[in-house]
Image: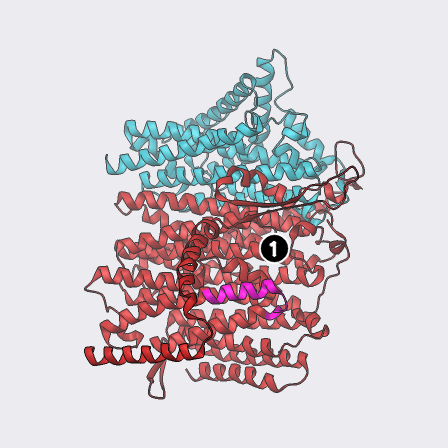
Chain colours: A red, B cyan
Amino acid sequence: MENFFIGIIALFLGGFISLLIKRQNYKLLFVSFMTFVATCFCLIDTVRVFTSGKLSDMLSFGVMFQNVVFSIDYLSAFFVAVISVMSFLAVVYANGYLKDYISKGKTITAHCFFLPMLIVSMLLVVTIQHALAFLIVWEVMSLSSFFLVIFEHENKDVIKAGIKYLVYMHVSVIFIIVAFVLFSIQTSSFNFAQFADAYSMNSAMANLVFVLAFIGFGIKAGFFPFHNWLPDAHPAAPSHVSAMMSGVMIKTGIYGILRVLTFISHPEVQIGYFVLIISVVSALYGVLYAISQHDIKRLLAYHSIENIGIIGIGIGVGMLGLAYNCPVVAVLGFAGGILHILNHSIFKELLFLAAGSVYTKTHTRDIEILGGLIKPMPKTAILFLVASIAICGLPPFNGFISEFLIYFGMLKGLMIDNILMFVVLILSIAGLALIGTMAILCFTKAFSVVFLGEARSKKASEVREDTTISFIFPMSILALFTLLIGIFPQFVFDFMLKPVSVFVEGCTSDVAQITSLMQIISLSAFALIILVLGLFGFKCLLKNKSEKYVTWGCGYNKPTSRMQYSASSYASPFITMLTPMFKKVVDIKKPKTIFPHDAHYEMRMEDVEEAYFLKPILKSLEAFFVKFEKMQNGNIQQYITYGLVFLALALICVVILG
Amino acid sequence: MDKNIILTLFNTLILLFMPFFVIGIIKKTKAFWAGRKGVSIFQPLFDTVRLFKKDRTISSTTSWVFNFAPVVVFATTLFAGLFVPMANCYSIINVVGAFVIFSYILGLGKFFALISAMDTGSSFEGMGASREACFTTIVEPAFFIILASLIALSGNYTFSSIANIIKSSGTFGILIVIMAVISLFIMLLTECSRVPVDDPTTHLELTMIHEVMILDNSGVDLALITWASGMKMVILMALITNLIIPFGSGLKAGVGLFLLTLILLAVVIGTLESAIARLRMSHVFEFVFVMSSFALIVASLAAVKMYGI
């Protein structure tokens, strides 16, 4: 554990010392260096855990926190590795991304302080095994990410999104507190080690506690219907922060769910179905709304909901496998889900960073006015393309491996002799296939509208690529990861078995079968790549000439960029098919008079869940609380009276109850 | 020679060269019903050979994606074909969960076909791409429902499991196979852009789906793409064939029967195209959705068969 603590201390030092540094760009450089040191030390401990088993340590802080256990088991080690590496890459990227802001004279002192604080709190969240201390670092995590989100706080929308995020996080923490309180009442302890099997006798309570924890952590993770903060917070935050939040921070919500699951060693069937169904709905909802978005970061944020859903499907299948005593289904489900955590953090971070590179050059997130960027920004384009293919779950990249494991788990689950399971799984398989094809629709749209065709505006036509190392290095590493996991799945699967062993053990024969299947997939991926490259080489060797001419337009030879298919027209057939799923908001100013000027048309799709579920609830709450307005009248004497009355009541309560 | 080697060779040959003949037979059938003599069934092969020799004209808007995509489309279709059971129900790469790998490899090809169409900056090609992407979202889930149900019925995770249904499940099996075949046939018409979903011989860009995506492709690129789409048709035909014909007979009979069914299916498609007109675009969605309904019927029948009523 020492290495891990050294890493934590390095990050703390990075945060505090950066406050003392005067030059803005050195601050960030120093923070990046300290993050690098921390990442190295954390990785040493992760490797130790994976080779020789669980590490743990006990520290005491004052009276409240006696004997707080820090431990890194396989599950925590997996998360520590993901958090440290992904955060480091995002911080490196920040050096390039914030250059423009610094040269415009923006101070980044607070930003440089909260970056390492966020990383520290995430690392502690996944290692602390003490409920109270956990809640404290959880809160630090939410607050530090809040301050990172409101980096551009001059902008009103950013502040609004930040507040929304903060409110959501605090609703989330209420559920988590209730769940933890229920555990600690039962066990009269705050240690996670004692929480295990607290409700093994009482399955109804176990289900209740799990659902409470799932809602609490699910708000952080972004499950439907608690996802609403994501599409607002991500566009508001700077790109590296969105990358960190979407790539890593929301996964701490998944960690929470998984950790609570270890307390309930044998989940009931009902909560398995609950997780599976809510995940399928989340994934479908996320990708559906992603298709309708034109703001690139909003689109990516909705895709985070989709991918969290896919992770949830894996976990749900795993839980059902446990509930029906079918270990191979459980192994496949958990392995797929946990691998998808890693995969999603890789390609989503890559997508956000690539989108950030486009944003720093074009200063717009609206994809409708971009286009043709593949020519001025070839490297960014190819990186974005790799990530797009990976996120659609297509071979030979990493997304395919985790989705395949989940599919295979569901197919194996069909053999469990239970008609309910059969129906739910058949529909989930169809759901996952639908999610995959919708993702293809969405990312062919995003990639081609941003990077292909002709530039749709002056902004997009005057772009030059920034190839400084802080941009290219993190993105290339991430792209390399996506490919490596895709072509060597057998090693990754073996590695995944360790975190999975926290939930389910045994069934070595089935595992051997899956490993050999992974080897075949690996060979197939190689064969496919060789086939494609070989054919391409053959095509290049052909001596046929090629001539350049304008695009075919029924004989019209002067096409303009406005004739291209736009993002909304590309998505239109699909959106039209599912019109009832959206709340269409049209902002229109029709041209008037004979010589019209100043016309305007804007259409956007608003979240149905927000409009028809959340807003009515908030309205009725508001109507209720408005009644108390009279009590707050600014009269200080009256406030003192309230205090006195309250104290008196408290005293009476103590006397009566005590 | 070993039986497997013969079948591997045979399947590869089928995969590579049958596309031309299938399209040739469809054309010949249509000519027959129209009272014409029609072109030779070797004509598609000659056309492709000629395209390989031709020079290309590419749009100045395009990037490397446009140049690269036809290769990916061809390679993925060919590679996906290796997973599919063909004659004698033999698939060259026979693994568990193969249908997922198969679909996702085809998905990679589709991804590149779509972005290559968008790369030209043409509104026609964008339109085709958007329609094609939309139809895929309807077709693919239905395909997964059918295959998952058949796998659950046979208890075998390989692709060739679909062949055993009719043998092992009795009268119920026949019912399931009929439903699955109808569903897969609609998938074939949609994916391979045949009437009534799309008309490959149409002249109007606004009504096309697949053909409009490749308006700007020429020479080698066009050859690869048409070859690949023919190959996709053979692959889907092979799936249907394996569903309806209970193999198990000897090598020669199996191979002969397989070829015969492919030809028969091509004739059926040709006849269908002569008999009906293509649907209006707004009705195409309804037609494609029929596939999902049949897929759900397959799933329900499988559930009834497995668990009783």
> What is the chain identity of the residue bearing mark 1?
A
Q: Mark 1 is on which residue type?
A: Ile
- Residue at left offset 77%, top offset 41%: A596
- Residue at left offset 27%, top offset 70%: A183
Say which quadrant the C terminus of chain B sits in. Answer: top left
Q: Position of residue B225 (x, y in %)?
A: 63, 37
Residue A274 can be seen, yes or no: yes
Q: Nearer the viewer, residue A430 or A300?
A: A300
> Which residue is label 1 attached to?
A296
A509 over B222 or under it: above or below:
below
Q: Nearer the viewer, residue A636 or B107?
A: A636
Structural crowding at the residue carrying mark 1, measured as other residues with C-alpha within 10 Å and reported as few (<14), some (14–19) or many (≥20): many
Quadrant in the rendering for residue B232: top right
Q: Is residue A595 left or right of residue B271?
A: right
Q: Nearer the viewer, residue B303 or B17?
A: B303
Q: Position of residue A197 (x, y in %)?
A: 24, 68
Which residues, given as a range, are shown in magenta? A151-167
Q: Position of residue A124 (x, y in %)?
A: 43, 76
Q: Is residue A171 magenta?
A: no
Q: Nearer the viewer, residue B250 or B189?
A: B189
